[in-house]
Structure formats: structure tokens, C-alpha cells
Image (tube, grey):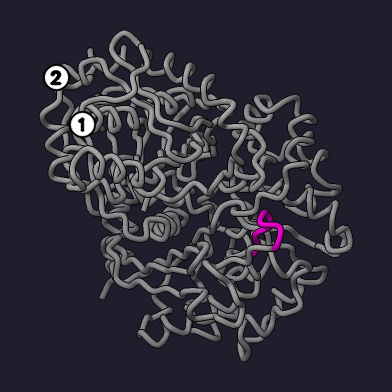
Amino acid sequence: MSCPLCVCFFKCLTLSLSELVDARCVVLMAAADSLYLGFDFSTQQLKVVAIDGNLQVVHQNNVQFDAELPEFRTQGGVHIHADGLTVTSPVLMWVKALDLLLDKLKSAGLDFSRVKALSGCGQQHGSVYWRRGAAETLQELNPQHSLHHLLQSSFSVSDCPVWMDSSSGQQCQYLQSAAGGALRLAEVTGSRAYERFTGNQIAKLQMTQPDQYDNTERISLVSSFAASLFLGDYAAIDYSDGSGMNLLDIRSRNWSEVCLEATAPHLDKLLGPPLPTTSVLGPLSPYFVHRYGFSELCKVVAFTGDNPASLAGMRLQQGDIAVSLGTSDTVFLWIQQPHPALEGHVFCNPVDWQAYMALLCFKNGSLTRERIRNECAGGLWEVFSAALRETPLGNNGNIGFYFDAMEITPTAMGVYRFDPQNNKVPSLSPQAEVRALVEGQFLSKRLHAERLGYSIIPGTRVFATGGASSNPEILQVLSDVFNAPVYTIDLSNSACLGSAYIAVQGLVAESEVSFFDTIKPATKPQQVATPHPSAQEIYDPMVKRYAQLEERVLQESRPLSHSHQSVQPKQPRAS
């Protein structure tokens, strides 16, 4: 009897390109017994999602670092050092977590032989330092022993700097000076110098721990380190996660020589050449084939950062924008032409290497909304929502800025209210205050997104996630301000899910099948809000007015800003 996959394949040989795309989806559907794994090496846990050939989630699992690996004595997955600035994580904790997670999958009955490809992601900006001789160890792993046992002596730095570290201020200043200033550095690498970014962390290590640096054979990001474990060799850094290092030229997609020279000696050799995110790195290491029963044909697709993986998991397309409404609000953008600025970040796009993604983080999110709810709506979301329904679009010209904590985008602090004549006022009516807060938050997101190259075009979709995305009235304001329909989507473990999608895409990327054709079988998002017909005429001029008032706020808050240390937190995933 003929194999149905073979029949589909030979039929494909006679089809046009458009027909071939649909036929590939048929082949994928026919291979529903195939599995694809997506891993997420995040700050507090290691997670995995398994999807089948129909892109449906069939298994999820995780390892909590603090609770399940207490011997590493982490809090929140990290070690905060005495200076309060240095924050690290033990690299062997991540290795042991993988041992434990794979054992959990085996106990759960996951059939590893069905896994056709795997990919993953890691917390952005963390770095791992492989000791000289580690490559040989990786290539000769003995399946009779755990990875943790085999790799105990493979790292020149045992506690690795992660995104929470803010101890490289001196190195940031030097890099920006060498690059020709903060804006010039942002134009080249997508971001001004940030203390958590990997290049500045490498520079600090080379300066303060030269022996460890000299004993390093390869430097990985958390993502490429994790891929190296599965590959049994050093894995390349992908374009997208590499964009978060202050080292990669985001247009040429090669390391910037100016930035390399300003960071550390021989750095290009220690990093290796970067690759597109959907690249197949090679077959899975024989270690996993013999220890867990994976297929010898299983492929390892490049790992990326957690934020890029979330963009893939949310299935954003050109012109789309994702808004995560959580403790911090985060904006993800798909953009074609980058316009880097002193705020926000531009990364290479993980699913289309010719495009870009932008990311903005706003510190004053849900906690500020809760404060205004308590003060102006009696602590009730129902009253808060009613205020949004009963006040007009544009709030009769009232605009507010609510920066309870030192804001990231823009760098400012304090509460500022303006009447229709742009006069500062001490207060607004409770209902106007609620709308001023919500409109102001979304006006800020639109303004700063546009400064990074985003523009509203016909067909633009806004994806909302996070706690506040369950509030229809808040989503209606979001739809109105952006003059675009709002969709919600189930984003549980979005970074894992995006990594699994990337694993699937890696197997077909060379055949020029697009990422979006690959993920057609996935569950579709649900539209939950449509912009009011008058939204554009109200909010287009209001965004311009908001920008002018923001300049006033920045001038007035500058003395206050300088009196507080501005800590740049990790851009949280929209999940």
C-alpha cells in the first residue's frame, strides 16, 4: 500500500507554487502524528510545549527553578549580589533543569521518536561563557550520564549575567562614545546602550575578570547556549536575539566592527557568524537519540529570544501591533523600515529576515490603572468601565500623563493633567480622570510606535493580551486610538508556542513557504472591538497634541527624573 505522505509529495511535483503551498499544508495535516517542541529558558522556569502536525498543543510542562532546584539557592531564578546592581544565574541550573524537564516528558509518555524538529528561546540579554575544550565535550556526550554531570567543567563563568543586571554603566558610556553617540549606536544596532545588553556585559567581564575571558572558547546568548545543548556543538546566534546585544548591525545583519572593537578583543571569533532565526542548525545530538529515544532525523532549528518568539507565537504580520496590558505594558510591532530612536528597541524579525520588529515597554501599566480605579471608581472595575462608556472619545479635550513610577517610555515621573487649552489642572472629574488615564496610555503607545516606524494602514490589526485585555471598554479605547480592529488570542506560553512554530517553519523555509502559510492550521484570533467611525478625526490630531504636551512633561519632570535612579527592566513578554 502506498504511503499517503509519498503520494502527496509526488503530486506536489506537478503543482504551481500557489498550489504547492496548499499542498504542503495538506502534507503537514497528513503528518498529524508528527510532533514539534518549543522550549523557553526564561528567568524563573524552563517550559516546553509540544504541538502536532495540525499545530495543536498536545502537551505542556515546566521546571520551576527556585522550587525544584533549591540547591542553586536562587530567588526568582537569579542571584542578586551585594551591590544591588549585579544579577546573575547559575548556568548549570539551566542544564540540570533540562535534564529534569526531559525526564518529566518521558514519564508523561511523550513519544520522542515522533519529534521531527525542535526550537526554543531564552531570556534576552543573558550570556553564557564556554570554557576552552567545551566543544569537544559537547560532541562526545555519554548518554549514560546526565547533561549536568557531563558539563560541570564546561563553563569559564559559573554565574552568568542576565537581563536584570545593571552594573555595566561605564561600558555603556564607552560604547556610545566609540559609536559616535547614543543615537548613532541606535541607528546601527537598534538600541542605545543598555546596561543589560550583552555587549556591555561582555565588556565588563573582559575588564573585571580577564582570566575568565581569556579562558573562554565561545560566548553564547541564553538562546544559542540552549540550542548548543541539543545540537552537541556550538549553535549560531540568530539575527533576532543577536539584535539585543548592542553588537549586531541590524541592516547588514553582521557584527558591527566598531562595536566589536569597542567591546572586547577577538570577539568576532568568540561569537561566531549569526544566522536567520528559522535556520536548521543540524541534526539532534546522538546523546538525545540514545538517552531519550529521539529520531536520528530530528532537526534542531535556531533558538531565539523570548520576545521574538512571542511575536511568532502571536502570529503578527506586517502592519500588525500587539499590546500586552500587564504590570508593565508592552508593545510589539511588525515593521518594514526601522527608525531606531533613543527609546525602545528594533530587532531583526524572527520569521521574516528582511523585516524588523520593534518593542516598547511602559512601566506604568496595571498598577496605575488599579490606582485610578480605586480613587475614581470606588475600587470597582464595573464603575471604571462605565466611566469609559459614558465619556466621549477625546475626553472633551482633557489629556493626562500618569507616571506613578519612573517611566521608561518616556523617561519621566509624576502626574500631569491638561485642559483643552493645554493649561495644567490639578484634577479632573472622576469619569474624565478614568478616560484621561486610558486614552493617555494608548496615545503614548501609538506616538512612540510611530516614532519607531509604525504606521496605521488599511488592514492593520491590534492584538491585545494581558490582564486588562479582558475589559471590553479598555479594548474599545485601544481600538479607537489606533483606529484599527482589536483581536484577542490565547497566548498561554506564547514564547514556547512561537518556538514550536519556528521549529515547523525551519523544515520548510528553504522551499520558500512563508511562515504564515506554515501556521494556517493554527487557531484564529477573535475580533473583539471595532473603531468608532469618528475615531480617526479625533485621535490623529490628538496624537500630535499629546506629543507636544509630552515635551512639556519631560522638561518639568527632568529634575525629578535625575533624583531617581532609572532602572531599565526587561521588556516583558506579551503572555
Quick check: marks 2 and 1 in contact, CB under 8 Å? no
Q: Does residue 388 appear left or right of residue 59 in this picture? A: left
Q: Which mark is residue 6?
A: none
Q: Identify the residue under disc 2.
A: 533
Tell me the crowding category of disc 2: few under 14, some 14 to 19, or many 20 or more residues within 10 angstroms, Cα based. few
The magenta stretch spans residue 438 = no
Q: Quadrant of the N terminus?
A: bottom left
Label 2: state its secondary structure: loop
Magenta region: which residues?
82-88
Q: Of the residues tagged 2 and 1, which is closer to the observer?
A: 1
Q: Identify the residue under disc 1.
A: 430
Q: Quadrant of the C terminus?
A: bottom left
Q: Position of residue 106 (x, y in %)?
A: 42, 85
Q: Position of residue 536 (x, y in %)?
A: 23, 17
The residue nearer to you, when weighing 548 against 417, is 417
Residue at image position (84%, 63%) is: 212
The residue nearer to you, when weighing 214 against 9, is 214
Answer whether residue 508 is visible to the viewer in this image.
no
Principal SS element in the magenta part?
loop
Tell me the crowding category of disc 1: few under 14, some 14 to 19, or many 20 or more residues within 10 angstroms, Cα based. some
Residue type at mark 1 is Pro
Which quarter of the figure has residue 537? Answer: top left
Residue at image position (34%, 58%) is: 9
Residue type at mark 2 is Pro
Dot placed on the residue nearer the N-terminal end, 2 or 1: 1
